[in-house]
Image (cartoon, rainbow, N blue to C red):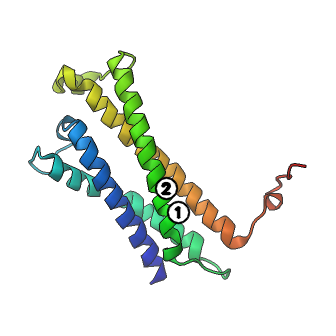
Amino acid sequence: MPWLQFVALGIVAACVYGIVHDQVTARVCVEYFTLGHAPLFATESPILLGIGWGVVASWWGGAILGLGLAAAARAGNRPKFDAKEMVRPVCLLLLVMATSAILSGMVGYWLAKTGTIQLLGRIALDVPRERHPYFLADMWAHGASYLVGFMGGWLLIVWVWWRRFGLKPEDLGIKPRT
């Protein structure tokens, strides 16, 4: 049962983050969801799109994180961590993800407004020209969330394993500075 608590923590955290993230990005550029993705259901409502895509696009990442944390925190005969101990680190990861999404979205928007980046292909024809910077802002924000979430999730798993097994840099052949 403790393993399932980690998986539940990961899924709930990812879905909450995904819904909040997509509530914002659906309002920045609804076309990102209606034209840039296969339709989930027939709506252009930013609220419904944010909820639907927030869950569909996020739950699996949370499940992977939860399974990884469960393995790092519970496997073996060393003292085990409880899922409760991971709530703050997971929340910190979500905060870092949100910050990176905001900053990346702003950079994507600025690069699009200055003509440094642009939409190409069919999507460039489907999305109204004046909406391109907003579409690219959403794209960059989502990309940052996935990248930082993936990297941060792995770092969190390694951190838990490291703490459980009491590894020191010397154990890995890393010499301490003198």
Name the quarter where the N terminus is drawn.
bottom left
The picture places residue 154, in percent across and down from the top left corner, at 55, 56
State the mark number for residue 93. Answer: 2
Type of amino acid at the residue the image marks with label 1: Pro
Q: Relative to the observer, which residue lies in front, 130 or 55?
A: 130
Q: In the rendered view, would you say 128 is above or below 152?
A: above
Q: Relative to the observer, which residue lies in front, 168 or 93?
A: 93
State the mark number for residue 89. Answer: 1
The picture places residue 66, in percent across and down from the top left corner, at 46, 67
> What's the distance in space between the residues labelled 2 and 1, CA to CA?
6 Å
Q: Residue at x 12, y 51 (%)?
A: 41
Disc 2 + disc 1, Cβ < 8 Å: yes
Q: Residue at x 22, y 55 (%)?
A: 51
State the mark number for residue 162. Answer: none
- Crowd band around label 2 with a 10 angstrom C-alpha radius: few (<14), some (14–19), many (20+): some
Residue at the top extreme of this rendering: 115
